[in-house]
Amino acid sequence: MKLRDIAHSRTGDKGDTSNISVIAYDPKHYPLLLAQVTAERVKAHFAGIVQGEVVRYELPNIAALNFVMSRALGGGVTRSLALDAHGKSLSSALLDLDIAADAADHTR
């Protein structure tokens, strides 16, 4: 299944840093996010886009993860030649990440 089946996201960007929060629709899916949506997987998912470090912050009280990705926007929104390198397009791409789960576990 896709990450978007169990979570939504919020984004922000500042300079050449993008941050993406992944929030479980249902708190019961938070352990699945913890186990499968790691900083390493996010970095690999954005290979060729994110040139810097990816740091994951855990927010268990709201069943969310926040990823801060440095050197992710081609030098910054105002310096990049990319048509849309803002965090919003990156969050949509992240929600396309494949995750494994029981079919019974991914209903909203």
Image (cartoon, grey):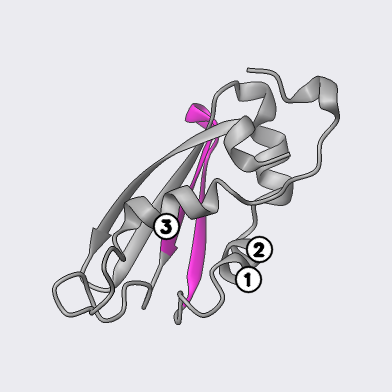
Nearest the viewer among 26 and 61 is 26
Q: Residues within 10 Å of mark 3 (few under 14, many from 20)?
A: some
- Find the distance from the CA under tag 1 to the CA under tag 2: 5 Å
- Say above or below: 97 vs 1: below
Q: If the image is split into quadrants, where does the N terminus sit?
A: top right
- Say above or below: 25 vs 98: above
User: Could you tell me if the residues under marks 1 and 2 are in contact, i.e. CB atoms within 8 Å?
Assistant: yes
Q: Which residues fall within the magenta stretch?
A: 53-68
The disc labelled 1 sits on which kind of residue? Ala
Q: Earlier in the sequence, mark 3 or mark 1?
A: 1
Nearest the viewer among 7 and 57 is 7
Where does residue 25 sit, x and y in percent of width and height? 55, 24
Q: Earlier in the sequence, mark 3 or mark 2?
A: 2
Query: Is 65 positioned to the left or the right of 10 in the image?
Result: right
Residue at the spot of label 1: 44
The disc labelled 3 sits on which kind of residue? Leu
Is residue 56 on the magenta stretch? yes
Where does residue 34 sit, x and y in percent of width and height? 67, 45
**Quarter residue 75 falls in:** bottom left
Label 3 secondary element: helix
Label 1 secondary element: helix
Query: Is 24 positioned to the left or the right of 98 in the image?
Result: left
The disc labelled 2 sits on which kind of residue? Arg
Nearest the viewer among 42 and 96 is 96
- Find the distance from the CA under tag 3 to the CA under tag 1: 13 Å
Residue at the spot of label 3: 90
Give the main secondary structure of the magenta stretch: strand
- Find the distance from the CA under tag 3 to the CA under tag 2: 14 Å
